Image: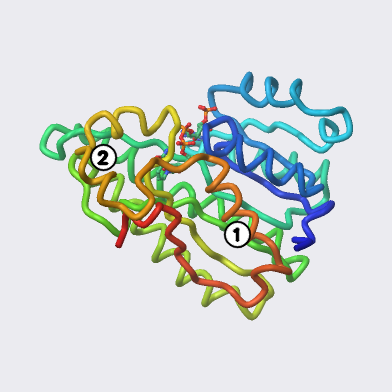
Amino acid sequence: MNLDLKDKVVCVTGASGGIGLAIVRAFLHEGALVCATYHRNPDKIEQLKMQLEPSLRTHLHAYHLDLQDNHSHKTCISHICAEQQRIDVLVNCAGAALEKPFLLLTPEEITQQMTTNFSQQALFTQQVAKVMLAHRKGSIVNVSSLLAKRLGRGVAVYAAAKAAIDRFTQTLALEVGKKGIRVNSINPGLIATKMSKNIQANMPADLMNMSPISRPGTPEEIANAVLFLASDRAASYITGVCLSVDGGLSI
Ligand SMILES: NC(=O)c1ccc[n+]([C@@H]2O[C@H](COP(=O)([O-])OP(=O)(O)OC[C@H]3O[C@@H](n4cnc5c(N)ncnc54)[C@H](OP(=O)(O)O)[C@@H]3O)[C@@H](O)[C@H]2O)c1
């Protein structure tokens, strides 16, 4: 199926991470123009650029974004708009998971988990949604987590922030649907990236074995689901959905 993403301007936050890089690659292969944001690791996007064939290379643009810094939001969005004129798709993939017993978390860690994984993402989304509203068209895909729906130890605040992202997805979908913007989220299960290394090591083997597809997922499997939800052709009637992509772990 043609997803009709060719020449769409797609902003992917957290593009320098394991899942983000796969999402960037997938959109580039659909012919989209990708604005990839990084925080501390611009080299990851540079490395990807070097691996791409020249025709795709010109479709990839890197921008700095620190979600914790509101000034950085404004700079990032204004650079994208100045260079690409619009934003058709926003994929909120940036995130930071801290696995630590709740009673040992410092106040700074609690705040940081909540702001990076939820409230600052909401602020960034608000700025991008204003750009989309000017064109009365857009698609937003939030990368949430299985932990928003299923219990996990040592992730109380991270899980709460992801649950907030899911509710945000649903209520924002209601607010902006009539204005031509769809909002959905993806709930990945355990995906093989740097972020999940510790979680995989601490996960009981029988939990993974009990799941219908008894293996961790790949970043590409998340990227395919993001493409689907982002596409106005494939998912034109889908909004406010929190889609589990977890090999059945959430059953
Ligand atoms: N891996 C999993 O098993 C799994 C499961 C469920 C959900 N998720 C979610 O999937 C998303 C991507 O995860 P991943 O596994 O790809 O993690 P990752 O490899 O650690 O990547 C995290 C990304 O977020 C960016 N980031 C972190 N703090 C930021 C900040 N303050 N401002 C802007 N960007 C920031 C990082 O940028 P730099 O590297 O440039 O600093 C990086 O691009 C996250 O939202 C995560 O919660 C992952």
Mark 2 sits near ligand 1, with its Cβ under 8 Å away: no
Mark 1 neighbour density, 10 Å: few (under 14) some (14–19) many (20 or more): many
Which residue lies most toward the left here? 103
Q: Position of residue 78 (x, y in %)?
A: 72, 43
Mark 2 neighbour density, 10 Å: few (under 14) some (14–19) many (20 or more): some
Q: Is residue 69 above or below residue 161?
A: above
**Res 76 quadrant in image:** top right
Q: Position of residue 170 (x, y in %)?
A: 46, 70
Q: Earlier in the sequence, mark 1 or mark 2?
A: 2
Q: Residue at x 49, y 60 (%)?
A: 185
The kind of residue on which mark 1 rests is Ile
**Res 55 quadrant in image:** top right
Q: Residue at x 83, y 50 (%)?
A: 85
Q: Secondary structure at mark 1?
A: strand
Q: Choose between 245 and 159: the one closer to the eye.
A: 245
Q: Seen in the image, is 76 located left or right of residue 194? A: right
- Identify the residue under disc 1: 140
Q: Is residue 78 above or below residue 244?
A: above
Q: Is residue 231 above or below residue 45?
A: below
Which residue lies most toward the bottom here? 178
Q: Secondary structure at mark 2?
A: helix
Q: Choose between 194 and 115: the one closer to the eye.
A: 194
The kind of residue on which mark 2 rests is Ile
Quadrant where the N terminus is found in the figure: bottom right
Q: Position of residue 86 (x, y in %)?
A: 78, 54
Label of residue 110 in the image:
2
Q: Residue at x 48, y 69 (%)?
A: 241
Q: Choose between 174 and 194: the one closer to the eye.
A: 194
